[in-house]
Amino acid sequence: MKTKKLRVGGLLVLATLTLATTSCKKEGCTDETAINYSEEAKKDDGSCKYEEVINDGSTIIVSENISENTTWTNDKVYVLNTRVTVLSGVTLTIEPGTIIKGEVGTGPNATALIIARGGKLMAEGNATSPIIFTTIADEIQPGQIDSPNMSADLDGLWGGLIVLGNAPISADNPSVQIEGIPPSDQNGLYGGSDATDNSGVLKYISIRHGGANIGEGNEINGLTLGGVGNGTVVENIEVVSNQDDGIEWFGGSVNVKNAIVWNAGDDALDTDQAWSGTLDNFIVIAGETTDHALEIDGPEGSALAAHTIRNGSVKGASNTELADFRDGARINLANTYFFGFPDPATDGRGDFSLSGQASIDNFTNGIINFSNLEITLENGSMLTDVFKDGTDANASSVMLNANTVGADVTPFLGWTLSDKRGELSNF
């Protein structure tokens, strides 16, 4: 049985044949493996097609940017072996149930899928067939939701999903380079003036085992939303075991509904650069390396928009802070329940704090606004031990599972790895 390679539109196709042939696209192709010539190939551009077959043709390696409208189908597994960008003016459609795997790589070799400004991702999974992004080490196949071999503790095995748009940001310039992408790659630029910008539809997507490091302190988030406009639909998103943040917003105006982050290596939810949208209905399940459940940063430029985060349930871990509001943050946080955090009076972690005078001033002036926050305290700690800087006035202590606010867990049942592994039983 022979194997050859076939490159078509930037995709390297793998399949299994009893006899593999390659087609030179036109006469004059000098590749010594080109043993078959056809009139159809003659119409092409002078390069050679290679075909390699593994198993039954169910794996496609994506090795180049996507420069024309493309559909990924759920009968195949798509493997990113480099940083792949959906270019401006191009739409990538991903069918429900499709599995995308990233090869292992760090630094400039980190694999990721990027939707550039002006590009679109139409990735509409559903409650029985989510779209799954994971590592090449994951043996999951189409039709499966739970992995047959991957521990939820494994992270940093590929990059992540990065969506960039033309909506306003608050930075030194109207558009800047996204973190996690080398400055030499101009497809990493985000930000603009169109708050209604549309980068597509993301529904029922599970992103697992990512967060590859491209440099010191510069990792890729599970889902990065940079300057994404509110014309974009983002609903029912899961991020599991990302080495950096679970979901991070950099400005923009996109709204997100039904998001769950389990075992983030840094912050579960991180907001920056005056994001002006709303996150509605969310769950955070902290892991042993999760730093903050919520890290809320202030504007970096002249734009001073605020965002809203509401209806959330947050399960802590031994090294995790509830939330930190930094650098003049601007936010409305409402209807959120915290439990499972360490006692800050003894462990020095597990608190809810305002960092810096600008954030304290914004809280005093109602620019940072908290309402209906509840917590189940651990080890006899006091409400004022946890909620610092006067924020205890907006919080109350409740018995475990006696909370009156929090997330609706129903949208996460059935399709998430978190549910399959039993992590939602306490919500």
Image: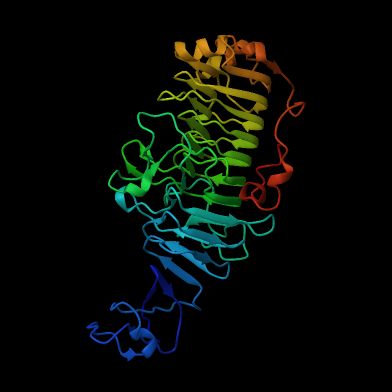
Tell me where residue 83 sits by quadrant.
bottom left
Q: Nearer the viewer, residue 340 or 12?
A: 12
Scheme of image coloration: rainbow
Q: Position of residue 38 (x, y in %)?
A: 36, 90
- Residue visible at 51% across and 22% down in the picture: 324
In depth, the one of 374 and 424 nearer the eye is 374
**If the image is split into quadrants, where does the N terminus sit?**
bottom left
Q: How many marks?
A: 0
The answer to whether residue 138 of the structure is visible from this angle is: no
Residue at 63% across, 28% down: 340
Tell me which residue sits at (56%, 39%) in the image.
Answer: 254
Query: Which one is in front, 47 or 60?
Result: 47
Left or right of 375 on screen, residue 250: left
> What is the x, y in percent for residue 128?
69, 58
Find residue 32 and report its horizontal and vertical position in percent.
Answer: 24, 85
**Does the image show residue 103?**
yes
Q: Vertically, is 293 above or below 185?
A: above
User: Which quarter of the rendering shows the C terminus?
Assistant: top right
Left or right side of 116 for 320: right
The single residue placed furthest to the front in the displayed view is: 193
Q: Name the residue: 44% across, 77% down.
A: 54
Q: Percent x, y for residue 238?
A: 59, 46
**Residue 98, placed above or below residue 291:** below
Residue 36 placement: quadrant: bottom left
